Amino acid sequence: MKSKTTLIRWLIVIGLLGAAAAFFALGLQHQFTLEALKARQHALAGFRQAHPWLLAGAFFLIYVAFAALSLPAATLLTLAAGAVFGLLEGMLLVSFASSIGATLAFLASRFVFRDAVQRRFGKRLQAIDRGMRREGALYLFTLRLVPVIPFFVLNLLMGLTALPARTFYWVSQVGMLAATLVFVNAGTQLASLQSLSGILSPRIVGSFVLLGVFPLLARWVVDRAKARRVYARWPKPKQFDRNLVVIGAGSAGLVTAYIAAAVRAKVTLIEQHAMGGDCLNTGCVPSKALIHGARLAAQARDAGRAGVHVGEVRVDFRAVMERVQQAVATVAPHDSVERYRELGVDVQRGRARIVSPWVVELDGKPIRTRSIVIATGARPFVPPIPGIEEAGYLTSDTLWQLRELPKRLLVLGGGPIGCELAQAFARLGSSVTQVEALDRLLIREDDEVSAFVRARLAADGVDVRTGCKAVRVEQGGDGAVLVCESAGHTLRLPYDSLLVAVGRKPRTAGFGLEELGIPVANTVETDAYLATLYPNIYACGDVAGPYQFTHTAAHQAWYAAVNALFGQFRRFRADYAVIPAVTFVDPEVARVGLNEREAREQGIACEVTRYDLDDLDRAIAEDHAHGFLKILTPPGKDRILGATIVGQHAGELLAEFVLAMRHGLGLNKLLGTIHAYPTWAEANKYAAGNWKKAHAPERVLRWLARYHAWRLK
């Protein structure tokens, strides 16, 4: 089927090129000049009197063909329509013929070229396609009125986008009317017309420009009207206390406030709880400190493999947790009230509530502000399992209060947080059971990544139960029991402590969003610029989604801050083109861009290049020769669509691929870059080398072999 489609495409291309070549080879371009049209005007008028329908039909078909083939004769044909058929009939013929011909050219371009262009530039065209789906009609209408791009080129380019064909047709029909009217009317005065340039007088060109600006101006007026309607019930202050108020001092809020202060805006940052948000206090920092302690325990147990015997490993869990809190305390000054006040941020502690688009109440005291950024983060989600509240549970927020190691820990959830903490507690000495309702861990990763992580957790003593749905919690004399359904069977899993790690839910309640009517569908709804229903109220970080990563929250914060402060001049769309993610199990799982599963689900053609770390010298030397790299590229191309790394230091190794994808560097560039030996980063170069081997020019190599053999004679 694919080969048949390719054949049809080639036939269309050959046919179009043949028609264009014939047009010029036969000298037909000389027949479509103003002088030739004037010379034939009377003959055509006579033929029309004798055969009106025949001439009209023939003219219509010829015009459609010329427009579809993008041949340079449309202007003369439009003049001819006015000269032969008059203004009204000429307008009807040209209007429909030009739109139909343009649509045929549009469809031919889409059929022949779009797939190839998508394979080559698909990632870069995503933003254009989103814009065309959203406002393609407006863009096309404006370009039709102001032909910055020649019409025939516009037909072909639009075929490469996601603009629907029906939209293209009706917008072309309407958008080309003004120019059609001018040229058909000029054709009715053909005898007095001296040159084509005479048609487009400065006044006519100016009128076209005004027509083209009109839809943009109309959209601006509509947007202003919508904004006025949204703000209608809220009195706007005559003066403001602040340029910006930021609610929430996690990663997103801190970066937003930092940027605002850096550009000398008056900014207030409000935090009800601890500065630094979840990442510093209950997330990234404490979890990585705990994982570090657990890794040391595992390494001590395995040290005998390297000839180092340390005896029995004893874990002082209280000391481990105290070290975790020391790490938090050491990092805390980076996010402290004192530091941000020194930077020029007005930091306030208390409960914030938005009472109007320009007023935030801080514990009942109003602050009048030009703009607001909501950066309230997220909290652990606890599923409504019968009996769970009565039995009690831990989350990633409350876990850090523990000072006694749970003998039997049940971890509910097989995502990144669940996997990281299940492995860490097992290494510290807990008997850990991990329960996941889906059929595998880390469901967003490839199957073999999930299988690899499951095997590593099992090797550390974690009893992994996938396809196991929690039904209820029961309590008895011997502790609590989680009752699950798995493959039609009922399982009873006893535990001493239950850690719920099934995801996080954005904090949206209690900040006044409901009263303002700001839509919340799990996350706060925002547009591409991170603005909410109100153009001066923005949201970023976990509360806005679509990613719940600290680094993504900081990335969004730049857009929220700049758009909130300078949006009246220019706004920037949030860019999610290259988002890295790391799961800090041991060994780590790191990914950027597409993986095999996503490429398959989205129907994206790609090649997969693999490099196994058991062949890397540094990995062998350090006794960590397990894991792999998988790189996705378009067929036959070295452009990186995505990279997945499973192994020691995977998060650090990923940075090179993030940089390469961000700046359009292919695997050939990575291969040509010197990497120090022996380092883990060499794995990236060897993966690029595997791609190069798979694309070696075999024909050239065969000729080189013959050349070298000849040189031996």
Image (cartoon, rainbow, N blue to C red):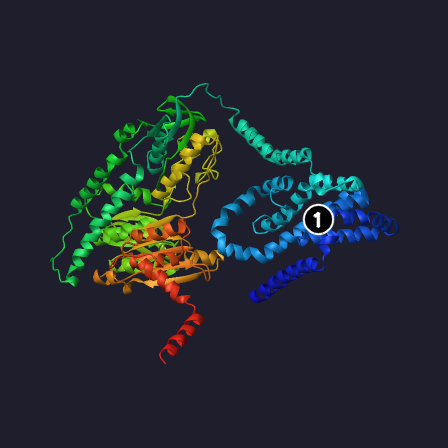
518 or 125, which is in the foreground? 125
Q: Residues within 10 Å of mark 1 (few under 14, many from 20)?
A: some
**Which quarter of the picture shows residue 239?**
top left
Residue 608: x percent and y percent? 41, 62
Q: Residue 226 in the image: state x and y as whole percent.
A: 55, 30
Figure check: 630 above or below 207 = below
Q: For the view shown, which residue lies furthest in the bottom direction? A: 713
Q: Give the secondary structure at mark 1.
A: helix
Foreground pick, 625 / 692: 692
In the picture, which quadrant includes the C terminus? bottom left
Percent across and percent down for residue 573 are 46, 40
Tell me what residue is drawn at x 38 percent, y 39 percent.
541
Q: Residue at x 65, y 59 (%)?
A: 16
For residue 583, say whether it is visible.
Answer: yes
Could one spot residue 624 in this view of the protein?
no
Query: Which one is nearer the viewer's eye here, 518 or 583?
Result: 583
Mark 1, residue position: 74
Percent of width and height locating residue 706: 41, 76
Q: Quadrant of residue 255?
A: top left
Q: Residue at x 57, y 66 (%)?
A: 1
Mark 1 is on which residue type?
Ala
Q: Is residue 397 left or right of residue 162?
A: left
Say which of 19 and 509 sits in front: 19
